[in-house]
Amino acid sequence: MEQMLQRILDKLENIEAELAEVKANMATKQDLALVQQAVLETNEIVKKLESRSDNHEKLLTLLSHRSLEHKAAISIIRSILTK
């Protein structure tokens, strides 16, 4: 009987030790709030970067069109000058 009680106490101590380890590794509400805040801030930064990327893409397209227009104009001027 005494051995059985000792085994139960040993198991209880093991469970308490495991519980303490779980509690030590567990995130708190404050930790989660900080993570949530970081995610929201990162999301805002990503949105700004996407917006800038879209603007840059539009600008590159515009510059590409202008370049083609300039090439065409130069070609026309060359053909006029060679006549």
Image (spheres, rainbow, N blue to C red):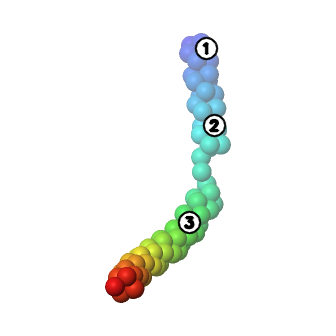
- Could you tell whether 29 is left or right of 77 in the image? right
- Residue 16 position in % (x across, y down): 62, 33
Is residue 69 visible in the rendered structure shown here?
no
Q: Amino acid at mark 2?
A: Glu
Name the residue nearer the viewer: 22 or 51: 51
Residue at 61 percent of width and 24 percent of height: 9
Residue 48, above or below 31: below
Residue 42: assigned label: 3
Q: Which residue is mark 1?
A: 2
Q: Nearer the viewer, residue 38 or 46?
A: 46
Alpha carbon distance from label 2 to label 1: 29 Å
Image quadrant holding the C terminus, namely bottom left
Q: Earlier in the sequence, mark 3 or mark 1?
A: 1
Q: Secondary structure at mark 2?
A: helix
Decide: few, some or many residues near mark 3? Use Cα within 10 Å; few <14, some 14-19, many ≥20. few
Farthest residue, direction front? 83
User: Which secondary structure, mark 3?
Assistant: helix
User: Is residue 73 placed above or below 61 in the rendered structure?
Assistant: below
Depicted 53 relative to depicted 29: above or below: below
State which quadrant residue 80 falls in. bottom left
Tell which tag, 2 or 3, sits nearer the viewer. 3
What type is the residue that disc 1 sits on?
Glu
Quarter of the figure that contains the N terminus: top right
In the picture provided, is 2 more to the left or to the right than 72? right
Question: Which labelled disc corresponds to residue 21?
Answer: 2
Sequence-wise, which precedes: disc 2 or disc 3? Answer: 2
